[in-house]
Amino acid sequence: MLWRSVGYTVMIYIIVIITMRLMGKRQVGDMQPSELVVTILVSEMATIPLQDPDQPLINGIVPILMLLAFNLALSFGFLKSHLLWRVFEGKEVIVVEEGKIDERAMRRNRLTLAELFEMLRLQGYTDISQLRYAIIESNGLLSVIPYEAHKAMTPTNASVQVQEPGMPQVLISDGKIMKKKLQKLGLNEQWLLNELSARGLQSVKDAFVLTRDECGNIYCMAKEKR
């Protein structure tokens, strides 16, 4: 019984490794939805003969091979049909366009402002107004396309002196004032209302987001009318 368990474990390990290699070398965070589902199912199928040594090894191997075959067939289908790709993998979503956040796209993808700003910071961007596009890809990762003037420094422009704006603070998020952050900057609600008024907004509830960096630069976007 012991040697059977050892043999089953080694065989399942080899088969799962071969399956994952044939599927590609993506990291978990880079996987498309269909690949992630297959990975989860393969891990579940692999445990069947390991949990019950009395089960024939073939009961674990056949489902794994079937999933692999289906995944490979689906991959070839994606090359032939864009519609098939859309059905199984979804499509990319533009959440920032021309320096403005698409509120509807945010709601459809259940993406909060805090999550968006975190994803942008991981890409090295803190000022939304510098972005031409920010796109949520079908695998959930964020692609950022800045304006030419705000692209990363290169040897040709390294000598240019630039002002460091620091980390922008979100002072209004979806019509709500972030009071602690406002107090931290030594500002008050009257100042906030004045800034909104200067941008044609009547009240805090009319603003979707307002940020201010350490240099005093303000980014403000009104809520979309529903």
Image (cartoon, rainbow, N blue to C red):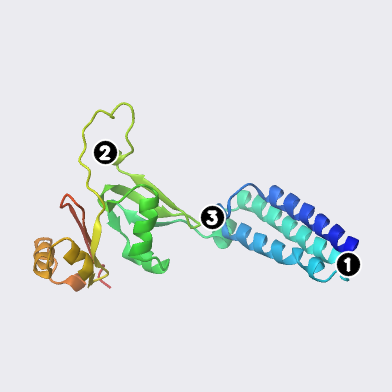
Q: Is residue 145 left or right of residue 165?
A: right
Q: Residue furthest top?
A: 156
Task: Give the residue type that dot 1 points to.
Answer: Pro
Using a 10 Å C-alpha cutoff, classify the residue at mark 3 as few (fewer than 14 neighbours), some (14 to 19) or many (20 or more): few
Residue topped by disc 1: 56
Query: Residue flagged by tag 2: what amino acid is it?
Result: Ala
Mark in front: 3 vs 2:
3
Q: How many other residues sit within 10 Å of disc 1, few (<14), some (14-19) or many (≥20)?
A: few
The answer to which of marks 2 and 1 sits earlier in the sequence is: 1
- Can residue 207 be seen in this snapshot? no
On screen, residue 208 versus residue 55, left or right, reads: left
Label 2: few (<14), some (14–19) or many (≥20) C-alpha neighbours in 10 Å: few
Determine whether 4 is above or below 216 in the image: below
Q: Residue at x 12, y 69 (%)?
A: 189
What residue is drawn where x is 71% and y is 66%?
44
Which amino acid type is marked by label 3?
Answer: Gly
Indicate which label's residue lies in the foreground, 2 or 1.
1
Q: Which residue is mark 3?
A: 29
Q: Which residue is mark 2?
A: 149
The quadrant of the picture occupied by the C terminus is bottom left
* Residue 185 in view (yes/no): yes
Distance (Cα) linking label 2 and label 1: 63 Å
Coordinates of residue 18 in the picture (x, y in percent): 75, 50
In x, y percent, where is residue 122? Answer: 40, 51
Would you identify the image quadrant in which residue 53 lies?
bottom right
